[in-house]
Amino acid sequence: MNQSPVYLIDFPVDVDADMRVQLGRLLPDTAVTSYQQQDIFIYGQDDWKAEENAVILLWDSVMVVSLVRRLFGQQPQANIVVLAALGDPERGSDVMALGAMDYRILPCPDEVMGIYVRKAGHQAELTRQAEIQRQGSDLFITQDVDTRRLLDQVALVAPSQASVLVVGESGTGKERLSRYVHQCSNRRERAFVAINCAAIPDGMLESELFGHEKGSFTGAVESRPGKFEIAHEGTLLLDEITEMPLHLQAKLLRVLQEGEVDRLGGRKPVKVDVRVIATSNRNIEKAVAEGAFRQDLFYRLNVVTIQLPPLCQRLVDIEPLADHFLQKFSDMYHKPAPKIPNSVLKSLQEYAWPGNVRELENCMHRAFLMSLDDSLHAEHLGFSSSVQVQQKEEVSAAMDVEAGMTIRDMERVLIEQTLKHVQGNRTEAAKLLGISIRTLRNKLNDYKSGTPLALAS
């Protein structure tokens, strides 16, 4: 927390000097500035504002009540203390009613003066954090108690320089949470740069990350900075980090340790200051055990780990998320957003959502486009209640669900039954499950150590 500056307003010269001596002795790093009222309100212009966490010390006078009212009119959160030589109980009552921190007769003890400054700084920090979380709430929408507690923890670690690892199923909102971390950090005014390690061919990924010099390879007609340089003093999101080839993992580890990148074909390293956030929908510890991911890089990234729950464990979030998406498409298509009847909401809450929030967004997009009146209907969702009941019966019979069965086991059997249904067509299975073909392939690879899936080969 930064030290709060102090403003002395309307103090007599001798009292002003005494106050400066006291503040200098008590708070040597505090900036103290003196004003007369006419200096800050010139020609009736109310454009003077104190710094957000400043302490405004006012000298008591017959005009102090109107001055306090004027200051609060411009800055409702101002930290104002009125100091008096003799004191006037009526004026003291008036300024306290307006919101002043205190009305006190001099001399003011050192410990009390220290309380004024610390309280102002603490209040400013609380206000800043509240505003950051308010802005961040637009990025990650949740009413789930456990997830909100998770966001509170994120807000605490976000201002640090620690690397963050976000894990969770595909579609749970890992990139949005990463943006939330950035928004809550001290780097929020700088760039947030994202790169999907699974979407870029291995031969191009190194250049995208670390940059290259002109002529370093065929087609390199000009020098280009990589994502690390572009994200300098900001945040870099490495999405699906487990898809990065091993040889690039070694180079990434060096960047994280040394704080510098080597461009392809470069002659000297380039210093970078980047906060790294990595995401994965795979079991990274298992990838480490299998030799597919470097253990030292895992330890470097695993300073703070955030586990995002799937949507099926956040049923309370389905309604606000659905409303949010409908409003988004309403703004996009300039058409009123339809309402969600209770019967449709029940269908949404009973669905398994294997594709998580991304699947819900796609479902709402489809339902919005198909809606002809001011309400959604079950057929707009792409799945009817009868189909859901049939699916539940088929899955329940095939899975032989028992108490204590893990979500992972249920997910595995669901994938198996879907593959059976589409006769092993992975593309069609991924479409029905609401996940990408890459996610399906990763999950199948994870299951190889156990019983082979039917028709999965």
Image (cartoon, rainbow, N blue to C red):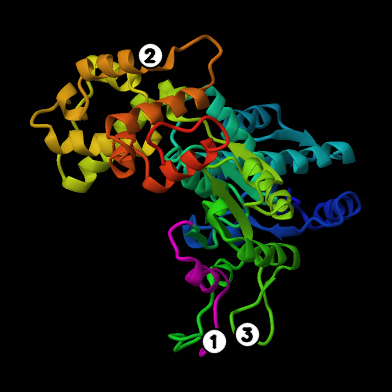
Amino acid type at circle 1 is Ser
Nearest the eye: 449 or 155: 449
Callout count? 3
Rendered position, 303 above or below 432: below
Amino acid type at circle 2 is Ser
- Please check the rendered image and state whether residue 212 is part of the magenta-colored stretch, yes or no: yes
Helix, strand or loop at label 2? It is helix
C-alpha gap between disc 3 and disc 2: 59 Å
Rendered position, 340 above or below 53: above
Amino acid type at circle 3 is Gly
Which residue is identified by label 3? 266
Rendered position, 88 above or below 71: above
Query: Pointer 3: residues within 10 angstroms few (<14), some, or many (20+)?
Result: some
Say whether residue 314 is left or right of residue 183: left
C-alpha gap between disc 1 and disc 2: 57 Å
Which residue is identified by label 1? 216
Expressed as whole percent of the image width and height from the top left, the position of residue 68 reads 59, 42
Expressed as whole percent of the image width and height from the top left, the position of residue 319 reads 34, 25
- Please check the rendered image and state whether residue 337 is part of the magenta-colored stretch, yes or no: no
